[in-house]
Each structure stands twice: as C-alpha cells, then as structure tokens.
Image (tube, helix red, strand yellow):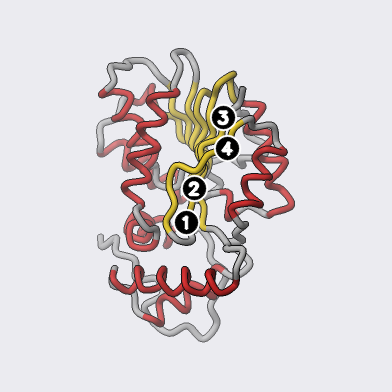
Amino acid sequence: MDKSDCIYDTPLKNVPPFEFNSKVAHVFDDMALRSIPFYSEVQSMIATYGRIFYRQDTAIYDLGCSTGTTLLSLYHSLKDAGHDKFKLIGLDQSAAMCEEAKEKFNKAEVEEASVDIRNEDILTAKIENASVIVLNYTLQFIDPLLREEILKHVYNGLTHNGILLVSDKMLQSSTDISRIFVDYYYAFKRSNGYSDMEISQKREALENVLIPYTVKEEQELFYSCGFNSVDIFFSWNNFTSFICMKK
C-alpha cells in the first residue's frame, strides 16, 4: 500500500484542522522526510546524544513518538554501543501512530523487551527514572497553556545529569526575517515535490494547531522549568533543536 504523502494534493473546499489520524499516520514517515529540513540528520544526532547520555538501569522516553523513527534510531545506536538491556518508552496520544510504530518495530525484528509503545497522554503518563527524554517536533503541537506543566513533569522524571532533546519549528523575532525564512522553507518543500496548493492547504490545516515560539521564548521556558543549561545543537532557518540538562 502506497505510503506517499498525498493528503493535500487535491483541492479541499474546507480544510479541516490538522490531526494525527490514521490517514496521516500511514504516510507520516514520507511527510516528515519531505517537510522537515535535515530530518534524518537530526534523528542521527538525537540517537548519538541518547547513547552518550544514557545511563544503565534508566529509561529513555520519546514523547510524541509518532511512528517510532526516533526510537528505532536510538535502539540501533544503543545496540551498536554494546548495550544489551535497556528500556525505550514511546508515548503518543494517537492510537494510529502507535500502531504504525509497533508495525515498524515488528518488521525491524526489534527485541520486544527493549521497546514499549504506549497510547497515553504525555501530561498524565508516568515519566520516571529517565536519563534521556525526547520531544521531537512535539512541543509545538501542545497547547501553550500546558507547555510549562508538561516540561516540569518531564524535568521531574529525569535523573541527575539527564537531558531533554527538543526540536521545533520556530518563530523569528523580526517579521522581515520570518518572511524570508518561510519563503526559504516553502522552496525546500517544493524541491521535495510538494505543489503550491499542497503547501497552502497544509499551512491552513496547521493554523492554530502548530503554535511556534521564538528561540528566546522557548529557551526561557526551559530555564523556568528548572533546566540548568539550554544549548542549541542544530538550527536551519525556522527549525531549531535544543539540548537541555538537569543538574
């Protein structure tokens, strides 16, 4: 069955708000690769940092794990480093995403005891004894009024010297710069085969669903939730990745 992203390739009279339903889950891997700049490279970096900061007898969480791409990268990274017993926990509110993730792990013949995919709400899920927590293009979809509460929940679930890895689409402090970055981003999407109609309809679907912060606002939020250091490990125009440490 074709897993190419064609969700917005026909005109829609009324574009519904974007949601992580079964239709999106089925094509999400293609959507992410074609919509997120340097997606594979960021995944590789997360897998490397996860391996470096992982501590024996702790867990690694991926919050908003979608189809499990990040978890699978982490799994192989830990295995390559010689770790035999570890626990990767993926949480996602979308049951369809969780099913896609489980199917991916079954095909990859991943050791069942090493990975646990849970269809749970990040805010209410138990997060504990984690040396590494990932929020990969997830925080941007969370209600801004809940972000501080969730990040404090994440902070409390981390061990001493644990890290939080966050990637998000960002706003710019200058309207002129923001316009240039967005134009550059749409050119990137066109280069990956998306039409202007697809770009326009996807943008409309994401309005009031994906709510970005500026880099400064996001960094201040991390510090206010207790993180002692907040650094950028990747940036491309209006996309930024952070590594936050709990001391």
User: Looking at the image, is mark 2 or mark 4 nearer the viewer?
Assistant: 4
Q: Which residue is mark 3?
A: 245
* C-alpha distance separating marks 1 and 3: 20 Å
* Mark 2 in CB contact with mark 4 (< 8 angstroms): no
Instruction: Kindly indicate the quadrant of the structure image that contains residue 36.
Output: bottom left
Secondary structure beneath dot 3 equals strand
Q: Which mark, residue 230?
A: 4
* C-alpha distance separating marks 2 and 4: 13 Å
Q: Which mark, residue 96?
A: none
Q: Which residue type carries mark 1?
A: Phe
Q: Earlier in the sequence, mark 2 or mark 4?
A: 2
* C-alpha distance separating marks 3 and 2: 15 Å
Secondary structure beneath dot 1 equals strand
Q: Which residue is mark 2?
A: 167
User: Looking at the image, is mark 4 or mark 1 nearer the viewer?
Assistant: 4
* C-alpha distance separating marks 4 and 3: 7 Å
